[in-house]
Image (spheres, helix red, strand yellow):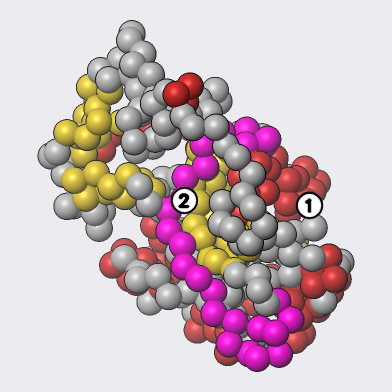
């Protein structure tokens, strides 16, 4: 697969969302009120060429500097431009000139729509694997987003390493993408339609975790996921029995996170101050914080709340003076008394 084939698919073959042949590059996540209001101010042509697979709009982003990897026609850029406010900024990077033409054509239209004295959005033509070639300074972004694009990258490890390099300490990489329940054979990855539909280049989820950790993101957090329906019979037959999933992850740039959930007797209380999340705040699929309730947390979760932009929305209790072992509920407390693992007989489940 080549960059040129992907550019052709998204610049020439696919002209609108309805041209897609699977549900991989579509979104059915309910939109929070703040995002619905923002989308109402985005140009119709920009909306018509949206190919995302998730909602890449984390909360509490006012004033942030944001980078969108694979920004396409600019839908997420123009929505987030309103949520970061006139003092924030959004930079989009995409390799398909036809998509960038749509995004750039409406820069002034959106600036006037938002009533900003000057546009807080900019777009660059470039490749996600070689972001070092663009005028993007190290540690210059508070938040990086991406929506169903990393699967199209030819070197996904390079994308993750670039994200780590460009984020400020405590910054966040929040993105949606397509994953497989096993490694996709090279023969399928070589087919332009399967690659263009975000299936051929989908990472096996366990390979993604390894790449993320090697790039520095030591504790990836899954926010939400859904199975992808491959409804076109010919495509379904080709990819069977592989199952695909759309998943949203958040990766924090917090050096020296621990490889396991460790218990230091720490706790947090959510203040209920995040917009559209007065009753509860969702950090990830396994951590939902109810307003006013004391929640025990592991050391990594404590840091994700305490050393990031989320700090002001929580009260913190405890310190690092005493370690109590593995955080209960996160793996086994003591592995030494476990039964030995034996190979399963052929035909049996492990």
Earlier residue among tags 2 and 1: 1
Q: Is residue 66 magenta?
A: no
Which type of secondary structure does the marked residue at label 2 adopt?
A: strand
* Residue 96 in view of the camera: no
Residue under the point 27% across and 20% down: 265
Total labels drawn: 2
Residue 75 screen position, x and y as percent: 53, 70
Residue 240 screen position, x and y as percent: 68, 77
Residue under the point 46% across and 50% down: 222
- Residue bearing mark 2: 222
Q: The N terminus appears in which quarter of the rendering?
A: bottom right
Residue under the point 33% across and 10% down: 322
Q: Nearer the viewer, residue 88 or 116?
A: 88
Q: Is residue 236 magenta?
A: yes
Near mark 1 (Cα within 10 A), the count class, few <14, some 14-19 or many ≥20, is few
- Check the image and name the residue furthest to the top: 321
Compared with 284, 234 (above or below) is below
- Check the image and name the residue furthest to the front: 345
Asked if marks 2 and 1 touch (Cβ < 8 Å), the reply is no
Q: Is residue 287 left or right of residue 204?
A: left
Near mark 2 (Cα within 10 A), the count class, few <14, some 14-19 or many ≥20, is some
Compared with 88, 239 (above or below) is below
Magenta segment range? 212-239
Distance from the alpha carbon under mark 2 to that under mark 1: 22 Å
């Amino acid at each position: 697969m080549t960059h040129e084939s992907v550019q052709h698919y998204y610049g020439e073959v696919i002209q609108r969302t309805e041209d897609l042949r699977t549900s991989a590059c579509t979104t059915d996540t309910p939109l929070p009120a703040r995002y619905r209001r923002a989308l109402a101010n985005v140009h119709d042509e920009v909306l018509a060429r949206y190919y995302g697979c998730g909602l890449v709009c984390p909360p509490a982003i006012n004033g942030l500097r944001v980078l969108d990897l694979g920004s396409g026609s600019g839908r997420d850029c123009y929505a987030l431009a309103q949520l970061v406010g006139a003092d924030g900024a959004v930079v989009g990077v995409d390799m398909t000139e036809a998509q960038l033409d749509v995004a750039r054509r409406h820069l002034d239209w959106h600036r006037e729509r938002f009533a900003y004295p000057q546009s807080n959005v900019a777009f660059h033509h470039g490749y996600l694997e070689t972001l070092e070639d663009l005028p993007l300074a190290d540690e210059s972004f508070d938040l990086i987003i991406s929506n169903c694009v990393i699967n199209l990258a030819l070197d996904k490890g390079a994308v993750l390493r670039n994200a780590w390099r460009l984020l400020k300490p405590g910054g966040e990489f929040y993105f949606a993408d397509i994953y497989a329940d096993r490694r996709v054979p090279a023969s399928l990855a070589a087919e332009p339609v399967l690659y263009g539909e975000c299936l051929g280049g989908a990472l096996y989820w366990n390979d993604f975790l390894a790449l993320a950790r090697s790039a520095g993101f030591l504790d990836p957090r899954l926010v939400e996921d859904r199975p992808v329906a491959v409804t076109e019979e010919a495509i379904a037959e080709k990819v069977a029995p592989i199952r695909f999933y759309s998943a949203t992850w958040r990766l924090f740039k917090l050096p020296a996170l621990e490889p396991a959930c460790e218990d230091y007797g720490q706790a947090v209380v959510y203040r209920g101050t995040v917009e559209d999340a007065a009753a509860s705040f969702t950090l990830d699929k396994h951590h939902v914080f109810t307003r006013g309730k004391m929640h025990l947390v592991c050391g990594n979760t404590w840091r994700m709340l305490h050393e990031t932009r989320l700090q002001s929305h929580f009260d913190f209790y405890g310190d690092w003076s005493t370690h109590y072992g593995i955080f209960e509920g996160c793996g086994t407390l003591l592995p030494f008394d476990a039964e030995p693992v034996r190979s399963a007989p052929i035909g049996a489940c492990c």
